[in-house]
Amino acid sequence: MANCNEQNCTCPKVECERHGKCCQCVNFHREKDNLVFCFRAIASKSK
């Protein structure tokens, strides 16, 4: 189950190698010091 979250992934970048792989995606964006797509709406509500 490498892409176990693919059905629920809201990221529009479906060609991304991390699409549907939440842990890899979060770790990648954490290293880049930016927010993953699926967290952006939540973050904007908290401002």
Image: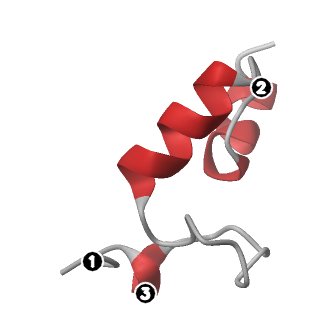
Q: Around disc 1, counting alpha carbons within 10 Å, would you say few (fewer than 14), some (14 to 19), or many (20 or more)?
A: few
Q: Position of residue 24 (x, y in %)?
A: 44, 48
Dividing the picture into quadrants, the one containing residue 32 is top right
Q: Amino acid at mark 3?
A: Gln
Q: Are marks 1 and 2 in contact (CB under 8 Å)?
A: no
The residue depicted at 73 percent of the width and 84 percent of the height is 15
Q: Position of residue 4 (x, y in %)?
A: 27, 77
Q: Amino acid at mark 1?
A: Cys
Mark 2 residue element: loop
Query: Would residue 1 be found to the left or right of residue 35 on screen?
Result: left
Q: Position of residue 13 (x, y in %)?
A: 78, 74
Q: Position of residue 18 (x, y in %)?
A: 55, 64
The residue depicted at 78 percent of the width and 75 percent of the height is 12
Query: Would residue 43 be found to the left or right of residue 28 on screen?
Result: right
Gap in Å between the C-alphas at discs 3 and 1? 8 Å
Query: Would residue 8 be found to the left or right of residue 34 on screen?
Result: left
Gap in Å between the C-alphas at discs 3 and 2? 23 Å
| Mark in front: 3 vs 2 | 2
Mark 1 residue element: loop
- Identify residue for label 1: 4
Tell me: residue 28, above or below residue 11: above
Of residues 26 and 46, the one drawn nearer to the viewer in this rendering: 26
Q: Which mark is residue 34?
A: 2
- Identify residue for label 3: 7
Q: Around disc 3, counting alpha carbons within 10 Å, would you say few (fewer than 14), some (14 to 19), or many (20 or more)?
A: few
